[in-house]
Amino acid sequence: AIVSKTNAFAKPSPIATGHSSKTKLNMSDTAGKPITCKAMVARGPKQPLSMEDITVDPPKAGEVRVKVIANALCHTDVYTLDGLDPEGLFPCILGHEAGCIVESVGEGVTTVKPGDKVIPCYTPQCNQAACIFCRSPKTNLCPTIRGTQGQGVMPDGTKRFKDKDGKEIYHFMGCSTMSEYTVLAEISCAKIADDAPLEKVCLLGCGVSTGWGAVLNTCKVEYDSSVAVFGLGAVGLAVVQAAKMVGASQIIAIDVNPDKFKAAKELGATDCVNPKDLDGKSVQQYIAGSLTKWGVDYSFDCTGNTEVMRAALECSHRGWGTSCVIGVAASGHEISTRPFQLVTGRVWKGTAFGGYKSRTDVPKLVEKTMSGQMPIDHFITHTFTGVGETNKAIDALHSGDCLRAVVQYE
């Protein structure tokens, strides 16, 4: 059942440590053996998730089996469930924004052990000397398991999930956290503090980190900058929050739902714009002409709408404006603008997971949230108990007043 619906835009304070459930893992009883548990299985696009008993096989070499304590709903899960993901495979187990406890590890795993708290990361970090991506400070896009992850399988090309009839179920984004247990690649596990509250820091597995990192890492927004944020879901509000933290002097929040403006203002927005209220003027013309003379220094698309991506670029400052694409567009969609927009100095770029190197940076983000430096409580507007409540969490995400719905599995 739903536990709470909150609006927690209070003065930031340190997060209480630990997590509320009294999890005791009898790891010696389950290590090396299949585990039967409950999971929400996506049987096909546009269908409600089906709660089923599944079998989760033991981890193989380089793998980690974890007990999922809490899972936050992300729009990427819904995007795939709606059939919009070109890599979407069914049946599968969705979910990628979670807090977990390691139950057992496969051969050769050295960076985590049973009992450790981890956040699964869909952007892995192999840290191998031969990986030019992990070695480079320019990117976090480690490709080591990208091919198999996109095919819904583990790095060795096989699956760890079976339904009650023994039929295999696909993995999702290397995480599949809409299950009481799941198997991850070791390089996808960010080990975090032992006293971290998993039902809160689970948010750092995707959306909130992505919004923060787009500002802090990808664009490196400077003090006194002007910023426009398109789309005020959890990612967009994280952008607003980070822009305020670095000292942006003007933060323009744009959304077609004016109910979201209150939260944006509480996080630092100086102006709120509903494109429907502009009497035929485009939002880019309004921002670069009415709200500012030449446009904003930085703009961020958090919608996944390609027309909005264009508007975000075209409202950025002539000569030096940078526009960052965060939202994921539906399969087959392309972006467009007049080349003159780029010739006159604007830069179009994108970000994945905010540029954070997962195993290195996520533990640091957890520490900052627990100390109160980067609060996250306000993103959790709905909480549910039990993996079987995941469909209700999806409904909440569709409602328009939900930033993040967290499902605690016990």
Image (cartoon, rainbow, N blue to C red):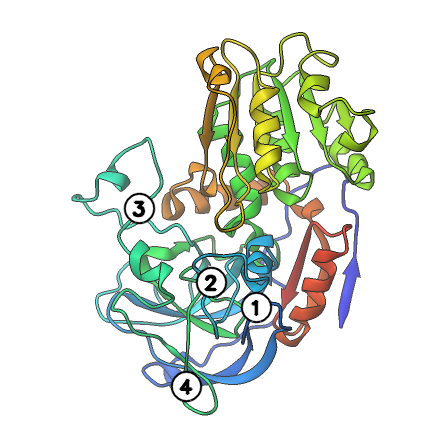
Three-letter code, disc 1: Pro
Three-letter code, disc 3: Cys
Q: Quadrant of the N terminus?
A: bottom right
**How far apart in space, not on screen, are marks 4 and 1 (Cα)?**
19 Å
x then y, percent, for residue 93 = 50, 71
**Location of mark 3 (residue):** 142
**Location of mark 1 (residue):** 45
Q: Residues within 10 Å of mark 2 (few under 14, many from 20)?
A: many
**Label 1's element?**
loop
The label number, if any, that marks residue 167 in the structure image: 4
Three-letter code, disc 2: Gly
- Name which of mark 2 and mark 3 comes first in the sequence: 2
- Name which of mark 2 and mark 4 comes first in the sequence: 2
Asked whether residue 208 is in view, the answer is yes
Nearest to the eye among marks 4 and 1: give it.
Answer: 1
**Label 4's element?**
loop
Q: Residues within 10 Å of mark 3 (few under 14, many from 20)?
A: many
Nearest to the eye among marks 2 and 3: give it.
Answer: 2
> Do the CB atoms of the residues marked 4 and 3 lie less than 8 Å apart?
no
Q: Quadrant of the C terminus?
A: bottom right
- Name which of mark 4 and mark 3 comes first in the sequence: 3
Q: Residues within 10 Å of mark 4 (few under 14, many from 20)?
A: few
Closer-to-camera residue (104/224): 224
**How far apart in space, not on screen, are marks 4 and 3 (Cα)?**
31 Å
- Name which of mark 1 and mark 3 comes first in the sequence: 1
**Location of mark 2 (residue):** 88
Quadrant in the picture for residue 184: bottom left
Closer-to-camera residue (196/142): 142
Nearest to the eye among marks 1 and 3: give it.
Answer: 1
Q: Residue at x 50, y 57 (%)?
A: 85
**Label 3's element?**
loop
